[in-house]
Amino acid sequence: MRKLTELVPDIETLLEMEPAELAGVAIEQLISAEKAGEKNLLHPAAFCRQHESFGQKLAPGVAERITKQLAEALSWLKTHGLIASSPESPVSGYFFVTRMGREVGSGKSLVAFRKAGELPKERMHLSIAERCHAQYIRGEFDSAVFEAYKMLEVKVREAAKLPQSLLGTALARRAFDAQNGPLSDKTQEIGERQALSDLMAGAIGSYKNPHSHRRVELTPEEAAEMIMLASHLMRIVDSRIGTGP
C-alpha cells in the first residue's frame, strides 16, 4: 500500500495543498489500500491520523490542521462520487472507492482529477455541472466542452423559440440580434446588445463547432475556462427568461 509520505514529500507541501489537490493524492492512496486489503485506512478516523506517518514532532496545531485537511479531502471525494459509505457497515463509517473513483484514480485521469479544483462544481450552471463535470473529472476535456456548448445552443433555441433548422452561430446571432432578437435586452445600449450577440456567436462557433467535427486536445486549464464561460452564458440566457438557477 502506498503511504502518504510517498505521495507528499513533506509536511510543508501537505499544508499548502488545496482540498481538490489533496483529494487526488487521497484517491490514489485509497485505491492502493483496497488492493492491498488494508481496510483500516478506509475509515475516516484512521485516514485523517496519517500525520503520524511523517514520524516527526510537529509544531503546536499542525497535527490538527493536517487532520482537518485530510477530512476535507475525503469530503471532496464523497461529494464528487469517488468514494461512498460502505453498504455492509454504514453505521461504522467505513467507505469504499466507487467505480468512477477507480477510473479517476488510475492512469492519466489522475492528473486531471488533481486539476479538478479549477472547475468547482458549485460555481457551474446546474445543468452544465450535471452533464459535464464527471466528464471533466475523467479527463474527457474535449467531450466536456462540446457537451457544455451543445447544451447552451439547445437552451438558446428553446428560450428564443427558434426553429431546429437554425444552428450554431446563425442561431446565436438571430436570438441575440441587437435590433430585434427575442433574447436581446432592449434596455441596454445597442452597442452592448451587439457585443453580447458577437460573444454568444463567437463562443459557440469557437468552442462547440470544432469539437463536433474533430478531436481537440485541451489542457485541464483550457477546458475549465471554456466550461465556465459556457456556464456564464447559460445564466445570461436564463436571465432573459427568468429561470436562472
Image: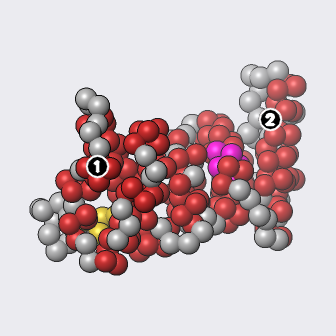
Q: Residues within 10 Å of mark 1 (few under 14, many from 20)?
A: few
Instruction: Mark yes or no: residue 81 visible.
Output: no
Q: Give left or right: position of 25 versus 228.
A: left
Q: Which residue is depicted at the point 78% across and 70% down?
A: 215
Q: Which residues are magenta?
A: 223-228
Q: Main secondary structure of the magenta part?
A: helix
| Amino acid type, callout 2 | Leu
Residue 238, quarter of picture? top right
Name the image quarter holding the N terminus.
bottom left
Residue 102 percent location from the top left of the image: 43, 72
Residue nearest the observer in this picture, 192 or 5: 5
Q: Give left or right: position of 45 versus 82.
A: left
Residue 239 percent location from the top left of the image: 61, 36
Q: Secondary structure at mark 1?
A: loop
Query: What residue is pinned by disc 1?
Result: 55
Q: Which mark is residue 196?
A: 2
Q: Secondary structure at mark 2?
A: helix
